[in-house]
Amino acid sequence: QVQLVESGGGLVQPGGSLRLPCAAPRNIFSLFVMGWYRQAPGKQRELVAGIASEGTTNYADSVKGRFTITRDNARNTVNLQMNSLKPEDTAVYYCNANSRVGPMNYWGQGTQVTVSA
């Protein structure tokens, strides 16, 4: 069973910052596209940011310039640095590992991010 270990959620004021780490097994981390998704109540789950093994990144338009996704290869960890947080960023955030060459797809358990004054 593949386990994605995610953390870093919590309550933060508008304009604040959070960092969400997600650790994966090395064989998954090295071959899969890693990413963070989020789902707010009543809305569909959406891609926030993704990063491929070669380092290419993709961001939702709503977070460009505020969020940064990086890979820490020594720790098999992807980090989502979230700055200038807004109330509309409030959601459950899910780490994801997706294979580009097969049907394998893995999810973390989700971590709540709440942006409120």
Image (cartoon, helix red, strand yellow):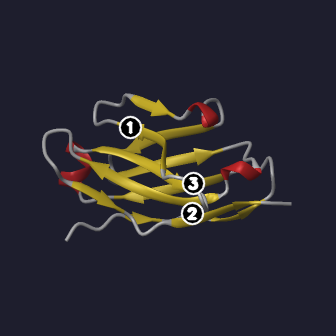
In the rendered structure, find residue 107 and report the number of the disc placed on it.
Answer: none
| Number of callouts | 3
Q: Secondary structure at mark 2?
A: loop
According to the image, label 3 marks what residue? 43
Q: Position of residue 102 (x, y in %)?
A: 13, 45
Q: Nearer the viewer, mark 2 or mark 3?
A: 3
What separation in Å lies between label 2 and label 1 (alpha carbons)? Answer: 19 Å
Residue ID at (52%, 47%): 80
Judge from the rendering whether residue 51 lies leftward or rightward of residue 18; answer left or right: left
> What type is the residue that disc 3 sits on?
Lys
- For label 2, the residue is 8
Question: How many C-alpha atoms fall within 10 Å of the one at disc 3: few (<14), some, or many (≥20)?
Answer: few
User: What residue is shown at x 35% (from left), y 46% (from top)?
Assistant: 34
Q: Using the numbered discs, state the Cα–Cα distance from disc 2 to disc 3 in whole angstroms.
A: 22 Å
Say which amino acid is labelled 1: Ile
Separation of residues labelled 3 and 1 (CA atoms): 23 Å
Q: Residue at x 64, y 30 (%)?
A: 65
Quadrant of the snapshot with the C terminus: bottom right
In primary-sequence order, the first of circles 2 and 3 is 2
Task: Name the residue beneath numbered marker 1.
Answer: 51
Q: Residue at x 55, y 38 (%)?
A: 68
Amino acid at pointer 2 = Gly
Nearer to me, 74 or 29: 29
Q: Say whether residue 9 is left or right of residue 11.
A: left
- In the rendered image, the quadrant that contains the N terminus is bottom left
